[in-house]
Amino acid sequence: MFLPKKMKPLKKIQMLKMSIFLVLSFTTFLLSSTPFPANLCLSLSCAATALLTIFPFLLTRRQPVFLLNYSCYKPPPHQKCSLEVAKSFIHRHASFTPSTVDFMLGIYLKSGLGDQTYAPPFIFDKNGVPTLKYAYQEAEEGIFAAVDKLLAKTLINPSTDIDVVIVTCGSFSPSPSLASLIVNRYKMRTDVKTYNLSGMGCSSGVIAVDTAARVLRSSGKVQNALVVITESITLNWYDGDSRPMLVTNCIFRVGCAATIVTNDPSFRRVAKMELVDSVRTHQGSDDSAYRAAYQEEDHKGNTGISLTKDLIRVAGVHLREHIKILAPRVLPLSELIRCIYSVLARNDKPLKHVVPDFTKAFRHMCIHTGGKAVIENVARVLELSDEVTEPARMSLNRFGNTSSSLVFYELAYFEAKKRAKKGDKMWMLAFGTGFKVGSLVWEWLQDSKQELDNPWMDCIQDYPLKAW
């Protein structure tokens, strides 16, 4: 991949804009004090006024942010978690009763997960104990593999070219932090800025990219941000018998993604996508939403994440609230007019939600792959066809719920299928504990292509599956 030279600091661009402003101001002064013919004076005055009107927009316009490239971790084949592997592990786990085993197997069979997903290393140990050592192993294997491949593709030198490091992990918060682990591993500069996010749930991948964009746009310099998105299945393993907490054992799988986000204008011609917009909503003030997915201790003192039956309802309700903010920002005017007309035409008819057609705004959608019920509920709320939800369903089958990194495995699916074309818009949608909904809106800057490290490379010909 071609690596362009670094541009001059963005402050010089701002200085150029200020110079234009001063020139326009001086021109206006001359027009008001020099005896030009009336028609010419009017024309020049209108032109100067128009330029002065759009100048504040140019001055305050957000700096572009690009996704230069990304990489998804694909664990080794010996970590595949088929139904037989899952059965073997839970049957030899002393703390599980027969009824608990039957419940987990039932959840697994209804989850939409296939036999090709990946489990953490401790599952394959004869003792099967989720220790801190195994948590470090899970984190290091995923992070180092994803970052190594990403740096190799982009030719970015981590010791000189990375200005910001953002790491998100839902539950594993060691000391030193995972961000410090990366700085140490890749010998980064002493002035590198690090951010370590935790407790954000499955939406934290979207949140981390949005955070990177905000940091880059607030900077007066050209900078590159390394965003690493991972999760710790090891330390989230639940040993008790509370059914809402046992669900996490059945659907979460190993995954990690890394991406370079940059505000360097010279990267536009080699970057994959440009970030067009981002929307984040938080419904934590609603008690039912706040406790829909909640980490706590059960009656025996075992810690686990409780996924309540109310979670699907909460996701649907707050997705509707989220799209009320997103829709006016992304939908074409014709679709907005249609929605307004539909609302006005109802008169006194029974209240029914008017759902915008988001396929008018987005050619591709990376929908939260939290589970089969979640995907089906999103499809119901947004009235999406099976064709639109295909990448989410296939990603859940192949990789399971990889938590914060899940939308990037869907992104890789689009690339493996070579479906995205230059100019296409893509929507990444993810939910998180709290309760949070996050959206990223991208525009493709080049046609998608399957790269050698694409996690779907060896199996994409088998997808989509006829049955799910």
Image (cartoon, grey):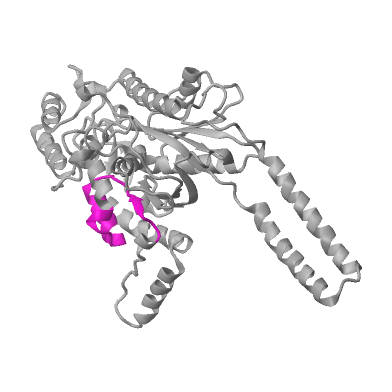
Q: Write the residue at 33% across / 69% down.
A: 353
Q: Is residue 291 left or right of residue 237?
A: right
Residue 309 shows in this picture = no
Q: Is residue 431 left or right of residue 93?
A: right
Q: Residue 323: within the magenta?
A: no
Disc tally is 0
| Residue 337, horizontal then vertical, whole percent | 43, 73
Q: Write the residue at 36% across / 39% down.
A: 404
Q: Is residue 226 left or right of residue 18?
A: left
| Residue 417, horizontal then vertical, whole percent | 28, 43
Q: Residue 377: within the magenta?
A: yes
Bounds of the magenta segment: 361-388
Q: Write the residue at 61% across / 25% down.
A: 191
> On screen, 121 above or below 210?
above
| Nearer to the camera, 379 or 290 | 379
Q: Quadrant of residue 461?
A: top left
Q: Is residue 349 left or right of residue 326?
A: left
| Residue 341, horizontal then vertical, whole percent | 40, 77
Q: Write the residue at 34% across / 70% down.
A: 354
> On screen, 251 above or below 428?
above
| Nearer to the camera, 379 or 39 | 39
> On screen, 6 above or below 463?
above
| Nearer to the camera, 391 or 38 | 38
| Residue 259, horizontal then vertical, whole percent | 44, 34
Residue 45 shows in this picture = yes
